[in-house]
């Protein structure tokens, strides 16, 4: 039985200080709530939080942030698809919120639709995969993350449920882009090339310790442009395939401005199922005069359909 189970009320304790002793009587034992598991007594504390910071202070700023996140995610989807490791972007549009959502009158919602990717969810199968498959996954995952790093995106949370793996084709697919965030411009020089040995990759936590221990120590990678050979950076040596150089932002055939224009020109009051765009996964409906002629009415900032010219 723990000592803390006893009630010391009325007990006499001898207190010694500077060589002098004095008997002290315990009048009341203040600990009340007991935790049987840890043999400790806990105190319950209640306090009020300052409500400032929980509500939206600047509506326009909040709308801009939401829109920026949406457009950024569209760019990420197209980037990963362009290197054959993600779903195709089938459709995207902006519309009014339906009645069952929080802001059915003035609220809008941004929607995008992607294709299904092959394979099985990695979270469900990785424990049954052999080392060769796990090395293939690590190499391709490193390539995906490093490509997005070059574009100024980094993954803030890692989990195998974000991925599908096609065992027959030995190909990894990234399909959940929720936790990607943009690297601030003034911090981009802090993020060097991502290698197969970095925490950005290993934090997915699917590689057994024995496998990692059997490999060579991680090489030192300096800040700036990648100088490490791809076979070392991505770990493709001996796997029977190679990875192309990462795509640079200047080589991307799409832009945030195009995404915004095509999304904003949709009728926000429409209620139709998404439709695949003809021709390819990326075929925005751009006016004949070009995207520069697409202007948004100021009324649109109040959540109302704008006039487009």
Image (spheres, rainbow, N blue to C red):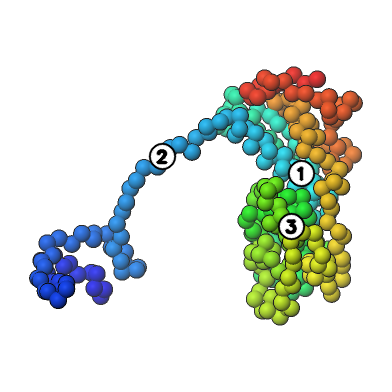
Which residue sits at x=62%, y=56%?
Answer: 157
Q: CA distance from mark 3 to mark 2?
A: 38 Å
Q: Are marks 3 and 2 in contact (CB under 8 Å)?
A: no
Q: Are marks 1 and 2 in contact (CB under 8 Å)?
A: no
Q: Is residue 2 left or right of residue 18?
A: right
Which residue corresponds to mark 1?
75
Outermost residue, front direction? 18
Q: Position of residue 288 (x, y in %)?
A: 90, 26
Which residue corresponds to mark 2?
50
Check the picture and name the quadrant holding the C terminus. top right
Label 3 or label 2, whichever lies nearer to me, is 2
Front one among 301 and 6 = 301
Q: Quick check: can you spot residue 87? A: no
- Neighbor class of circle 1 (other Cα within 10 Å; few <14, some 14-19, many 20+) is some
Q: Position of residue 151 (x, y in %)?
A: 77, 50
Q: Which mark sits nearer the N-terminus, 1 or 3?
A: 1
Q: Position of residue 83 (x, y in %)?
A: 83, 54
Residue 18 disc label: none
Q: Is residue 3 left or right of residue 95?
A: left
Q: Position of residue 166 (x, y in %)?
A: 78, 61
Q: Which mark sits nearer the N-terminus, 1 or 2?
A: 2
Residue 145 disc label: 3
Q: Which mark sits nearer the N-terminus, 3 or 2?
A: 2
Q: Above or below — where is 93 with respect to 42?
A: above
SS under mark 3: helix
Label 1 or label 2, whichever lies nearer to me, is 2
Q: Are marks 1 and 3 in contact (CB under 8 Å)?
A: no
- Neighbor class of circle 2 (other Cα within 10 Å; few <14, some 14-19, many 20+) is few
Q: CA distance from mark 1 to mark 3?
A: 14 Å
Which residue sits at x=66%, y=74%?
Answer: 208
């Amino acid at each position: 039985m723990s000592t803390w189970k006893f009630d010391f009320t009325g007990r006499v304790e001898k207190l010694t200080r500077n060589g002098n002793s004095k008997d002290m009587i315990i009048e009341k034992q203040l600990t009340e709530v007991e935790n049987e598991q840890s043999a400790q007594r806990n105190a319950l504390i209640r306090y009020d939080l300052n409500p400032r910071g929980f509500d939206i202070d600047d509506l326009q700023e909040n709308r801009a942030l939401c829109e920026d996140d949406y457009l950024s995610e569209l760019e990420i989807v197209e980037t990963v698809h362009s290197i054959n490791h993600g779903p195709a972007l089938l459709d995207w549009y902006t519309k009014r919120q339906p009645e069952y959502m929080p802001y059915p009158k003035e609220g809008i919602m941004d929607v995008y639709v992607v294709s299904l990717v092959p394979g099985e969810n990695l979270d469900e199968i990785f424990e049954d995969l052999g080392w060769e498959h796990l090395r293939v996954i690590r190499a391709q995952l490193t390539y995906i993350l490093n490509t997005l790093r070059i574009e100024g995106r980094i993954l803030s949370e890692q989990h195998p449920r974000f991925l599908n793996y096609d065992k027959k084709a030995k190909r990894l697919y990234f399909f959940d882009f929720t936790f990607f965030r943009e690297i601030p411009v003034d911090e981009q020089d802090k993020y060097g090339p991502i290698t197969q040995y970095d925490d950005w990759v290993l934090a997915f936590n699917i590689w057994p310790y024995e496998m990692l221990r059997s490999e060579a120590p991680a090489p030192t990678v300096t800040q700036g442009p990648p100088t490490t050979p791809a076979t070392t950076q991505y770990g493709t040596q001996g796997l029977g395939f190679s990875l192309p150089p990462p795509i640079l932002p200047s080589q991307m055939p799409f832009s945030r401005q195009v995404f915004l224009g095509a999304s904003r020109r949709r009728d926000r009051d429409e209620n139709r199922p998404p439709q695949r765009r003809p021709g390819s996964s990326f075929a925005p409906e751009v006016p004949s005069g070009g995207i520069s002629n697409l202007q948004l009415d100021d009324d649109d900032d109040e959540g109302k359909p704008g006039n487009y010219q």
